[in-house]
Structures are given as structure tokens and as C-alpha cells.
Amino acid sequence: MSFRDSIPKELVTHTIAMCGAVGERWLDSLPSLVRELEERWSINVGKPFPAIEFNYVAGAVDKNDKPVVILMKSSMGFGVDYMMGTHKWHGAAPNDEQLEMALLQLPATFGDY
């Protein structure tokens, strides 16, 4: 089973529905992010918890076999100053001017549109 196949279907579905190509890239980056955390924190990450819809959550053990949990989530509107920290944009589309402002703040995603 691939790492991507181990991610709860609900998380994949919601991430792609809410974030499109950016969400796909985040999902694709999870294996390397998990490996980085394992190395940085000296932990061994297990399978993700099932049926989690909006965050990647998995059990892990540290170097002393103490159980821990990792939680990876995104911040709503992260990277766009007028969208960060508010639920106003959840399910709402920016107008053309707002979209242009957002894309200028997120140059890595500009080619997606």
C-alpha cells in the first residue's frame, strides 16, 4: 500500500475539494513531511487515524517508546493577508480583484490558474 493510499479518504476528498491543486500538492508532500518529523523529533510515525476529514493525525512513538500523536493541518487562508485567520472565505470565492491580490501573494500557485 502506498503512503497516499493510507491517508483517510475523507481527508483526501475534503482537501482536494477545498484546495484543488494546492491541496493535491500538500497531500503529495505528506510522505516527506512525515519523514522530516520522524528525523527531527526522533519518532516513528504509524498509520494515520481513520475517518479524519480536515487534518492528518497519526500515532507515533518516541525514542523511549512513549506514545505521541502528530497533527498536521493547514491554517485557513494561510499566505493571503486578507484571508488569514477568518472563516469568511470558507466556501466563498473572491472577486477578480481579490483573486489577483491573492495570487500575487502566492507566487508558487500562480501557474495553477
Image (tube, rainbow, N blue to C red):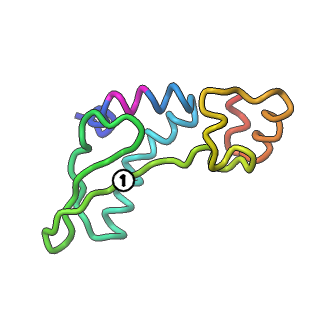
- In the image, what residue occupies the spot 67% across and 31% down? 112
Check disc 1 and give the amino acid type: Leu
Q: Which residue is mark 1?
A: 71
Residues 110 and 13: in front is: 13
Q: Secondary structure at mark 1?
A: strand
Residue 10 is inside the magenta segment = yes
- In the image, what residue occupies the spot 30% across and 40% down? 3
Which residue ends up furthest to the left in the rendered image?
65
Residues 43 and 97: in front is: 97
Which residue ends up furthest to the bottom in the rendered image?
64
Residues 46 and 92: in front is: 92
Q: Main secondary structure of the magenta part?
A: helix
Q: Looking at the picture, does residue 73 appear above or below residue 61?
A: above
Q: What count of labels does the image hold?
A: 1
Q: Which residues are magenta?
A: 9-13
Assign the C terminus to one quadrant of the image. Answer: top right
Assign the N terminus to one quadrant of the image. Answer: top left
Give residue 53's position: percent from left, percent from top: 37, 34
Give residue 101's position: percent from left, percent from top: 82, 41
Q: Looking at the picture, does residue 42 appear above or below residue 17?
A: below
Give residue 36's position: percent from left, percent from top: 39, 61
Which residue ends up furthest to the right in the rendered image?
97
The quarter of the picture where residue 8 lies is top left
Residue 29 is inside the magenta segment = no
Give residue 40's position: percent from left, percent from top: 36, 70
